[in-house]
Image (cartoon, rainbow, N blue to C red):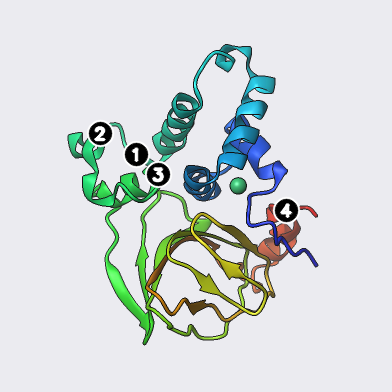
Amino acid sequence: MSHNLSHHPDNVMLVEFSAGTLPTAESICVSAHLHFCEQCRTELLRLDQVGSQLLTEAEPAEIDESLFDTVMAKIDSAEASPKLATAEKVQSFPHSVSKLIKNPQHQPIWKRLSASVDIARFKTGQSEFEVALHRICAGGKTPKHDHSGVEYTVVLKGSFSDERSVYKEGDFLVRQPGDVHQPMGAQNGECICLSALQAPIKLSNPLGFLMKPLLRINPM
Ligand SMILES: [Zn+2]
């Protein structure tokens, strides 16, 4: 059983992000976390320098931006909207998330999931993960649930708690299949999270069943 309580992406993910080999959904979550976390930005900078001497002279903000563009290039189609450059209304969100929200092709529509939770799903051009925003109202209790796949979550606004911990802005969580939890929104305001939930693997499909160990992101 793997419990990642560090609230940061593990080093394997950062190495893959730096190398550009981390899949799209995970990359969106990592880049959202990097927006908040200087510690991981510093580590990423170090990894980038290991990977490429060309980046040695660059400033962290520039590196962040170029990495982000690499990630988004996988998602965006060729034509770029000029609106994307001035995403003023969502500037408090990480660039990766703002860009998803502002792009008409990926525009999320909020839907009520339960009495205290709304969800807005993104179209990200990949089917392995469902990428979505979750909004938990102040003090809201979500249904107790588990997952059939890995789930990554980054807190974008506010905070929430579960049986294990309190999660604040920027915190990065990994939930393994079988983890049961019941997030609760903080009393002092709504909480908005970005999440990437691995699409359920159909156990009726024998190949899908065999593939399962290969899909694990975190080998520890
Ligand atoms: Zn971090």
Query: Disc 3 on helix, strand or loop?
Result: helix
Query: Disc 4 on helix, strand or loop?
Result: loop
Q: Amino acid at mark 4?
A: Asn
Task: Identify the image quadrant of the C terminus.
Answer: bottom right
In the image, is residue 19 above or below residue 50? below
Q: Amino acid at mark 2?
A: Ala
Distance of label 1 from label 3 (alpha carbons):
11 Å
Regarding residue 21, the answer to whether it shows in the image is no
Nearer the observer: mark 1 or 4; the answer is 4
Distance of label 3 from label 4 (alpha carbons):
23 Å
Along the line of sight, which residue is nearer the eye, 72 or 184? 184
Which of pointers 2 and 4 lies earlier in the amino acid sequence?
Answer: 2
Along the line of sight, which residue is nearer the eye, 24 or 90? 90
Nearer the observer: mark 3 or 4; the answer is 3
Task: Identify the image quadrant of the N terminus.
Answer: bottom right
Disc 2 under 8 Å from ligand 1? The reply is no
Q: Amino acid at mark 1?
A: Asp
Q: Residue at x 40, y 63 (%)?
A: 133
